[in-house]
């Protein structure tokens, strides 16, 4: 076919791939092409040994002593600092804890309290829904708080920003389309209006370089179970710029965020620095899995990941458009690599069935209602040949109409 690489060229791309060896550090089932690392990253071998050590040696043998001897208590800040390297945060500004949803709650409250004369939260109408649900929850506890949405109250975030806005909550990479925002430019715009900004980095961390400090961002939150491969339900993170630490008050004022948690005092006194975003006891085994995942990241530069991510997603778009254009697929992601994250989405009127048929044939992506088939490309374990094979399966399913079988229309709980 004209204009697209042939199989030999695609295999040559794998042979020249500097990240190629990383694939062997993951456990991936035989016969599966995994294009859903933007939802749940794959398991790296490191993770198993970390969990086993934490459970069999530290917990079973050292019991309660392990909080001290194995350093469990300090893991949230230690892992926060290690993760910080991947998101452009100097040490002392990131902490790993709780879930993204809970962290949004804490951070939005903190930001609103820092702008007491203002009452507006700006967010995106097409945000991942939990961000909006949490913003609604925050607003419900603070009478007079108003939520303004891009795509509902105005076409762009920029048009919604004025001197009533306390905080902007925005996704760096949109979960559905993969569209990427300019962090430095929007942060500048927020600050010019006197507002604070919170960046949701769920689809950024481990997928592309980002510079929170260099962009002068105020806050960020995100998960570690997607491109960082921390494991199902892995703890999330919060970033808060150093300059704000003294001003942060957050309402989930549990003992882990206290200045002296083991003094067992009456009355809350916020702890130092980023620790004040902690609430209660953290999931140690999940933290340890994340530690194993981050150990692998010590060997990788995010810039190399980004370079391969753009090449993988470019190849996928080109192959799909060359081989599947007759079958009703419409590109939903930006065509230019520099404008999207590490995923590609297409709309198809029967997207749900098409994705179910793909999964049955071993190509795992996911579906987002009403019509998006979504494919995530994790450069650490996805190769160019995987892209080639996945498109072949997609083409076959569409050309033969295999997706029309009735069983593919039966809805599963998680899509
Ligand atoms: C942009 C974004 N925010 C938040 C979440 C999820 O938050 P939580 O970790 O609380 O389930 C997701 C999950 O896919 C997401 O894509």
Image (cartoon, grey):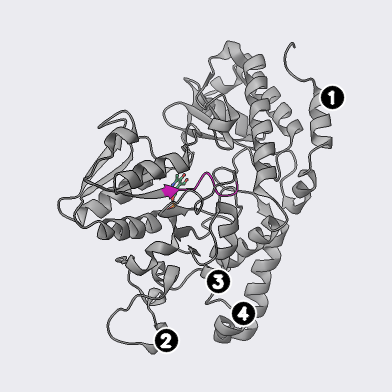
Tag shown at residue 210: none
Residue at the spot of label 1: 8
Q: Nearer the viewer, residue 216 or 301?
A: 216
Disc 4: which residue: 70
The residue where tag 2 is placed is 262
Q: Residue at horizontal 69%, vertical 50%?
A: 301
Q: Measure how far apart labels 1 and 2 are at the Cα level.
A: 63 Å
Whichever of labels 3 and 4 marks the residue nearer the N terminus, that label is: 4
The relative height of residue 322 versus residue 223 in the rendered view (above or below) is above
The correct choice, above or below, for 298 with respect to 42 in the image is below
Residue hosting label 3: 75
**CA separation in Å, label 3 and label 1:** 46 Å
Sequence order check, earlier mark of 1 and 4: 1
- Please provide the residue range marked out in magenta: 199-206
- The Cα atoms of the two marked residues, 1 and 4, are separated by 50 Å
**Residue 412 place in picture, x, y as percent:** 48, 39
Q: Is residue 106 toward the left or the right of residue 328 in the image? A: left
Q: Earlier in the sequence, mark 3 or mark 1?
A: 1
């Amino acid at each position: 076919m004209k204009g697209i690489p042939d199989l030999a060229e695609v295999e040559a791309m794998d042979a020249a791939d500097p990240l190629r060896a990383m694939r062997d550090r993951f456990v991936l089932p035989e016969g599966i092409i995994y294009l859903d690392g933007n939802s749940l990253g794959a398991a790296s071998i490191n993770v198993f040994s970390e969990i086993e050590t934490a459970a069999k040696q530290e917990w079973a043998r050292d019991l309660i002593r392990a909080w001290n001897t194995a350093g469990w208590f300090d893991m949230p800040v230690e892992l926060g600092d290690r993760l910080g390297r991947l998101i452009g945060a100097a040490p002392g500004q990131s902490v790993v804890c709780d879930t993204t949803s809970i962290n949004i709650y804490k951070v939005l409250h903190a930001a609103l309290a820092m702008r007491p004369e203002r009452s507006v939260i700006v967010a995106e109408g097409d945000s991942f829904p939990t961000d909006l649900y949490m913003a609604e929850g925050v607003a419900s506890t603070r009478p007079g708080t108003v939520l303004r949405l891009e795509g509902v109250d105005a076409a762009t975030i920029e048009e919604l920003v004025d001197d009533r806005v306390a905080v902007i909550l925005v996704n760096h990479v949109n979960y559905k389309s993969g569209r990427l925002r300019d962090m430095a430019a929007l942060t500048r715009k927020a600050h010019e209006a006197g507002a604070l900004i919170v960046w949701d980095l769920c689809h950024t961390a481990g997928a592309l370089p980002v510079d929170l400090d260099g962009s002068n961002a105020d806050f960020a939150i995100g998960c570690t179970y997607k491109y960082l491969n921390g494991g199902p339900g892995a703890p999330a993170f919060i970033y808060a710029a150093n300059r704000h630490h003294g001003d942060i008050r957050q309402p989930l004022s549990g003992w882990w965020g206290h200045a002296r948690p083991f003094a067992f005092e009456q009355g809350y006194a916020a702890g130092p620095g980023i620790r004040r975003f902690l609430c209660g006891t953290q999931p140690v085994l999940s933290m340890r899995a994340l530690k194993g995942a981050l150990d692998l990241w010590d060997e990788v530069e995010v810039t190399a990941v980004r370079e391969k991510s753009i090449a993988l997603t470019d190849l996928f778009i080109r192959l799909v458009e060359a081989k599947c254009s007759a079958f009703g697929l419409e590109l939903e992601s930006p065509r230019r690599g520099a404008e999207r994250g590490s995923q590609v989405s297409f709309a198809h009127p029967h997207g749900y069935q098409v994705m179910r048929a793909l999964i049955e044939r071993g190509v795992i992506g996911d579906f987002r209602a009403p019509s998006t088939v979504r494919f995530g490309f994790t450069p650490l374990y996805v190769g160019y040949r995987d892209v080639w094979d996945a498109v072949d399966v997609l083409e076959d399913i569409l050309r033969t109409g295999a997706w029309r079988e009735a069983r593919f229309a039966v809805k599963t709980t998680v899509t």
